[in-house]
């Protein structure tokens, strides 16, 4: 029996090996340079202990002068793109061929399973083709400027707790790790706006919301193990047949229950809070009147993002649950990190911090020392420039993908990408190209002045992606970052700490791109405010 088991395991391993390496000749055959693959990770040798963004940057350093080069993500051939004009074609012009980030089969490998895995399988980031279009079209109107105005009060409310926390740090006078504070702010803002609950991240050290959110974000060894096990052909189908969920089912259940209760309560009581849950409930009604805003027209990014979708399938409550979950996952760490990097840069660039504080002070003074209204917040040019520069230098999402829906010949080339192969791009590479950025290696907010923007290929900025599949929460993220930065910098100044390990090295255990050891600063009250 032992021998039979061993033989079975060897046969399974050989099959898995053969399956993963079956395309490893692809780029050699078509004669384009490529990053050498090996089993099981392809060109991304995670055994090196580096983050995916950095492994990919190493490929770009080697082949970045080519218009395309090849690499393998596990067994999947990827055409790595270096030219922003090719990205314009992939992300916008020929979007219908590149709707999905990852192919349906790979997505299902990660999320096929029991009820709670299925919730993840239906999230916006995972959905593909027409199913994705239906959900994206239904929920896009939730993020228009008009709806963001309604979210402002929730974000402002949470910013009071943030200020209290910063004040405590200032009183103690010791340096502190930034994401431990801004992560809480971001989680509270999403809990309030998207879940309709108070997560009490600052005030309750035993908050269940925080406990379960942390579990969902942890890259626990068992979770990583499951990812590998799921690559073995047949395992995802088996998990589905046996209705076994492996993607943090307990914590997923916690959030599913919260959202379901919120929906039920609002249906029963007709209570309206005008938050994202209310808007989502409204969006899935057949006679929904949650519409796009007229005032969101004009800018290149907004125009490219528009999705042409006439089909409108009726969505159910489970779709609300999956979407609320994805807003939490996609919005929490990204925004918390952005605010942490911003504060770190302010501590280390005092002249930029002072100029930003002058702009913020003026806005408060003109509002009679009250928090300025939505239109004023959005009209502060330097604040907007500093946030975008933070995202240029420290994009939380570096490596990004698109999947080819069918065989396609890239324009002005004889290269044909085959169905289910991928396009890969790296924001970190694009954000430093000297031909597009006047001061690529400095923290230089003027990169986002009207003049520099007008003279630059817009597809070279990829912090939020581009086109109809770009970040749906961008407006919410920018509003959150603006409110937090204004609240804090009106009262406090950041000063450099000593505990940050420099040069910053991205932690390979961080799902997104955050440095090992964290970002440390001190904070001091500003005497005049
Ligand atoms: C500074 C903060 C943020 C950054 C840097 C960021 C970045 C990104 C990026 C790079 C993508 C992929 C875009 C593409 O493939 O073209 C994305 C997708 C997405 N983001 Fe964000 N994001 C942020 C905040 C948020 C927030 C606050 C939310 C929700 C409230 C959110 C929700 C989403 C969702 C749902 C997707 C998937 C969209 C789809 O597949 O249709 N993000 N984000």
Image: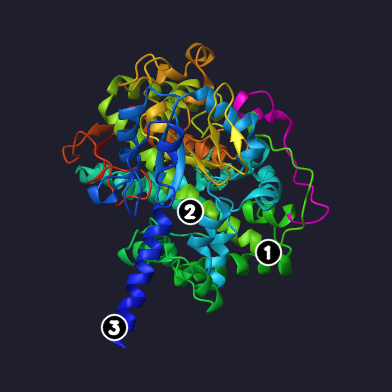
Please name which of the two marks, 3 or 2, marks the residue nearer to the observer: 3
Q: CA distance from mark 3 to mark 2?
A: 45 Å
User: Position of 104 compared to 519: left or right?
Assistant: right
**Is residue 68 magenta-colored?**
no
**Is residue 288 magenta-colored?**
yes
Question: Between 409 and 44, which is closer to the camera in this rendering?
Answer: 409
Question: Between 333 and 264, which is closer to the camera in this rendering?
Answer: 333
Q: Quadrant of the C terminus?
A: top left
Q: Residue at x 70, y 50 (%)?
A: 130
User: Position of 46 compared to 436: left or right?
Assistant: left
Q: Residue at x 36, y 34 (%)?
A: 394
Q: Residue furthest bottom?
A: 1
Q: CA distance from mark 3 to mark 1?
A: 50 Å
**Which is more N-terminal, label 1 or label 3?**
3
> How many badges with numbers are in the image?
3
Residue 187 in sight from this viewpoint: yes
- Residue 173's label in the rendered image is none
- The residue beneath circle 3 is 3
- Residue 317's label in the rendered image is 1
Classify mark 1: residues with Cα within 10 Å, few (<14), some (14-19) or many (20+). Answer: some
Please report the bounds of the magenta region as a residue range.
Answer: 284-303
């Amino acid at each position: 029996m032992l021998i039979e088991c061993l033989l079975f395991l060897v046969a399974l391993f050989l099959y898995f090996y053969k399956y993963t390496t079956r395309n490893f000749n692809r780029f050699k055959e078509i004669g384009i340079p490529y990053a050498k693959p090996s089993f099981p990770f392809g060109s991304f040798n995670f055994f090196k202990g580096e983050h995916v963004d950095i492994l990919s940057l190493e490929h770009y350093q080697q082949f970045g002068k080519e218009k395309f080069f090849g690499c393998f993500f596990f067994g999947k051939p990827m055409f790595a793109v270096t030219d922003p004009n090719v990205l314009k074609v992939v992300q916008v012009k020929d979007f219908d061929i590149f709707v999905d980030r990852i192919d349906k089969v790979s997505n299902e490998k990660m999320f096929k399973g029991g009820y709670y895995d299925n919730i993840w399988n239906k999230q916006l980031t995972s959905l593909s083709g027409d199913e994705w279009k239906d959900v994206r079209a239904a929920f896009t109107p939730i993020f228009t400027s008009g709806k963001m105005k309604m979210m402002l009060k929730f974000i402002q409310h949470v910013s009071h707790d943030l200020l209290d926390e910063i004040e405590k740090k200032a009183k103690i006078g010791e340096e502190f790790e930034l994401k431990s504070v801004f992560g809480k702010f971001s989680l509270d803002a999403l809990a309030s706006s998207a879940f309709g609950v108070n997560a009490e991240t600052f005030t309750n050290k035993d908050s269940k919301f925080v406990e379960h959110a942390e579990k969902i974000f942890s890259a626990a060894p068992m979770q990583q193990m499951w990812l590998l096990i799921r690559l073995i052909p047949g395992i995802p189908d088996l998990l589905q047949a046996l209705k076994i969920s492996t993607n943090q089912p307990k914590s997923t259940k916690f959030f599913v229950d919260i959202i379901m209760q919120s929906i039920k309560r609002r249906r029963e009581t007709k209570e309206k809070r005008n938050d994202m849950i209310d808007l989502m409930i409204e969006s899935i009604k057949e006679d929904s009147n949650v519409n796009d805003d007229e005032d969101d027209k004009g800018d290149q990014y907004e125009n490219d993002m528009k999705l042409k979708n006439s089909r409108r399938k009726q969505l159910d409550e489970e779709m609300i649950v999956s979407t609320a979950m994805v807003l939490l996952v996609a919005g929490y760490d990204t925004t918390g990190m952005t605010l942490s990097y911003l504060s770190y840069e302010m501590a280390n660039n005092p002249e930029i911090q002072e100029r930003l504080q002058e702009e913020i002070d003026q806005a408060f003074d003109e509002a009679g020392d009250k928090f300025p209204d939505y239109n004023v917040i959005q009209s502060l040019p330097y604040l907007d420039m500093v946030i975008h520069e933070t995202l240029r230098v420290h994009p939380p999402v570096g490596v990004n993908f698109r999947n080819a829906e069918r065989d396609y010949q890239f324009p002005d080339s004889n290269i044909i990408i085959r169905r289910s192969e991928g396009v890969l791009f790296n924001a970190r590479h694009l954000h430093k190209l000297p031909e597009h950025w006047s001061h690529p290696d400095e923290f230089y907010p003027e990169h986002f002045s009207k003049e520099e923007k007008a003279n630059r290929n817009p597809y070279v900025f990829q912090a939020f992606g581009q086109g109809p599949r770009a970040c749906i929460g961008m407006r919410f993220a920018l509003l959150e970052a603006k409110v937090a930065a204004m609240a804090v910098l009106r009262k406090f100044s950041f000063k450099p700490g000593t505990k940050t390990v420099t040069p910053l090295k991205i932690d390979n255990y961080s799902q997104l791109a955050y440095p090992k050891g964290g970002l440390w600063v001190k904070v001091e009250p500003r005497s005049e405010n």
